[in-house]
């Protein structure tokens, strides 16, 4: 083979490789790839009530200041500032079994560790620019959970006008109960939501006090992100968030769902 032919073959091969690389980069986010990986990465899952299947968690979205009284206690005016969204990593999930007390580790770096009880929404379908009128069709089921927060770190970063991910997105920061399919529990627009620490009620409200409904949250989120099956949404917390220390017992409740309990260790 001549040198010219060799160069042509090399260029053709390089072009094919580049095309393949570009095609690989163009795969949708989260698309399965057939290439082997150097190690296994665990997928976070949540049990599904009444099923042997488990719910795979892709992303955790959280909505901030979605109850007016909580917005005010955090120094915001709910009539002027709409709720906003942030994320936790999927492996922040800590599954809590109803009827049992789960040990919840007090995290590092903080001296002001706060609880926030929330309704959790699990999606079965995704999309972009989802109309609020059809948003609930995308819901697979519901649970209740805790958005645990290193409040001192969150406030310190906020005061410095830096991202406060360190205050929200850490190991075990998203305790959650099993997912209850919509077909069994319906949708949640009202009902009591409360949290107790060592038997004393700390948070106590109703879901109807949400500023943005579940449908509106899904719709707004889908304007900023392409939602996918496996996405879950922590839908905001009522007022009276506060600190816990090692040894404290937290119990949370939402009407229509079994209570959950964790002990800070």
Image (tube, rainbow, N blue to C red):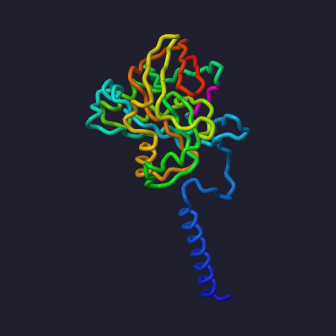
Q: Magenta segment, which residues?
A: 93-97
Question: Horizontal and vertical percent for residue 49?
Answer: 67, 34
Of residues 64 and 256, the one nearer the viewer is 256
Q: Is residue 111 visible?
A: no
For this orientation, the residue located farthest to the right is 52
Residue drawn 44% across the image and 20% down it: 204
Q: How many marks?
A: 0
Instruction: Please give the name of the residue rendered at 50% of the width and 54% of the height, measured from the top-left corner.
Output: 127
Residue at image x 56%, y 21%? 105
Which sits in the foreground, 140 or 27? Answer: 140
- Left or right: residue 158 versus residue 109 is left
Measuring 64% from the left and 58% from the top, which residue is drawn there?
33
> In the picture, residue 261 is in which quadrant?
top right
Picture coordinates of residue 123, whole percent (x, y): 55, 45
Q: Position of residue 210 (x, y in %)?
A: 40, 33
Q: Nearer the viewer, residue 74 or 162?
A: 74
Where, quadrant-wise, is the N terminus in this rendering? bottom right
Image coordinates of residue 104 in percent, x first then y, are 58, 22
On screen, residue 21 above or below 75:
below
Res 77 quadrant in image: top left
Q: Is residue 155 magenta?
A: no
The image shows residue 241, relative to residue 51, as above or below, that is above
Q: Please, what is the dominant secondary structure of the magenta stretch?
A: strand
Q: Is residue 5 visible?
A: yes
Residue 96 part of the magenta segment: yes
On the picture, is 113 further left or further right than 259? left
The quadrant of the image that shows the C terminus is top right
């Amino acid at each position: 083979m001549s040198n010219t032919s060799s160069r042509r073959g090399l260029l053709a091969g390089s072009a094919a490789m580049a095309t393949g690389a570009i095609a690989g980069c163009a795969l949708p986010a989260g698309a399965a790839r057939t290439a082997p990986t150097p190690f296994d990465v665990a997928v976070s899952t949540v049990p599904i009530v009444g099923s042997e299947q488990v719910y795979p968690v892709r992303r955790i979205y959280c909505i901030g200041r979605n109850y007016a009284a909580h917005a005010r206690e955090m120094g915001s005016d709910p009539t002027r500032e709409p709720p906003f969204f942030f994320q936790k990593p999927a492996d922040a999930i800590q599954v809590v079994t109803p009827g049992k007390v789960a040990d919840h580790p007090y995290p590092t770096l903080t001296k002001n560790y706060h609880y926030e009880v929330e309704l959790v929404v699990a999606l079965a379908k995704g999309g972009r620019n989802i109309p609020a009128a059809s948003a609930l069709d995308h819901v697979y089921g519901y649970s209740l959970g805790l958005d645990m927060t290193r409040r001192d770190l969150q406030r310190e970063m906020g005061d410095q006008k830096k991202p406060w991910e360190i205050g929200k997105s850490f190991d075990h920061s998203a305790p959650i109960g099993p997912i209850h399919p919509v077909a069994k529990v319906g949708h949640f627009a009202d009902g009591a939501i409360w949290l107790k620490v060592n038997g004393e009620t700390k948070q106590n409200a109703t879901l109807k006090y949400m500023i943005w409904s579940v449908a509106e949250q899904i719709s707004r989120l889908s304007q900023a992100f392409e939602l996918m099956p496996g996405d879950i949404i922590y839908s905001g917390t009522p007022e009276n968030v506060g600190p816990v220390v090692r040894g404290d017992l937290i119990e949370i409740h939402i009407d229509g769902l079994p209570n959950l309990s964790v002990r800070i260790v």
